[in-house]
Amino acid sequence: MNILYCGDEGISKGVLISILSLLMRGDKSAEYNIYIMTITFESVKPFKSSTAKFLNELVKKYNPKNSVKLIDATKVFTKNLPQKNMGSYFTPCSMLRLYADKVPELAKLDRILYLDYDIVCRKDIQDFYNTNLNGIEAAGICDIYGKHFYHYHGLKQDYMNSGVMLFNMPECIKTKMFERAVKKCTERWMMLADQAALNKCIKNRKLMPRKFNEQAERPKADTVLHHFSNNFKFWPYFHVQKIKPYEIDKIHNILKITEYDDIFDEYNKLKDNL
């Protein structure tokens, strides 16, 4: 399975937990080819090569055929900067996946599953990964908030959360989906630029069940991928709750979740290697 993460050195803790969850909760015989896209640009501190090397050694302990490869996408990113969205709340790295077609190692792949660094695997993902993508550019899951406000086919709820997306690379290259998404970010400011651009430019999408990207603060019985995304809270006052997988005390004390403790135990043993 081809897995993609994108970001700077700040995502390393989340990526370690996410990878551990894939290894510990997935099929033990599965082969993971994990790619991490990063850049060196202005104040952005790139994902460390030493961290990628450590992660590569880690995944091979579970299966010698597993691998982690760090990709420096600085050249392809700076060649066509998403100018209108460079000053957003998110780092420029949030838009890196939009350049996947310009990276030879990724462009040659049949499919690749993009995961945000705050995704924890709860069950085996192979059913999702192997879904039929004939004529489909990407498979994803509706955004739990955005689906009520944004629609691309009438009133159908089809606005996807970009934290979990399965890309059919040949189809995306054929339709120039990534190129069009980068162009959107270059010419127009958008809230949640990467997610907005993908939703605007993916013409042929496949909506998958919510269990493959559960964005609520607590997982459900059938949840496969748990996304520790931002959640709106209305009590005792309106605020945005932001809890990430490596904030273990908050996960225990606020969310009352303990089912990932085996993963967190491994993380605590290994985190100093980052």
Image (tube, helix red, strand yellow):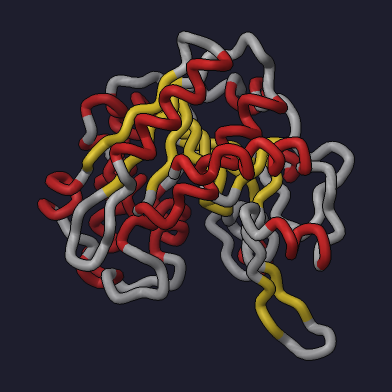
Q: Is residue 241 above or below residue 125?
A: below
Closer to the camera in the image, 96 or 256: 256
Q: Residue at x 29, y 38 (%)?
A: 49
Closer-to-camera residue (233/177):
233
Residue in front for this viewpoint, 41 or 220: 41
The residue sitting at 71% across, 75% down in the picture is: 232
Q: Is residue 211 left or right of residue 199?
A: right
- Locate the C terminus and report the quarter of the image it occupies: top left
Q: Is residue 219 left or right of residue 91?
A: right
Q: Give the answer, above or below, for where 257 lies relative to 16.
A: below
Residue 31 location in percent, x, y? Answer: 53, 14
| Residue 111 in view of the camera | no
Q: From the top left corner, tell me how far across and down residue 124 is, in percent.
A: 71, 25
Residue positioned 71% across, 40% down in the render: 265
Specify the farthest residue to the bottom: 237
Displayed quadrant of residue 70: top left
- Residue 26: x and y, percent? 68, 23
Q: Residue at x 58, y 51 (%)?
A: 118
| Rendered view: 110 above or below 258 | above
Residue 181: give x, y in percent of width and height: 32, 52
Residue 56 showing in the rendered view: yes
Q: How many marks?
A: 0
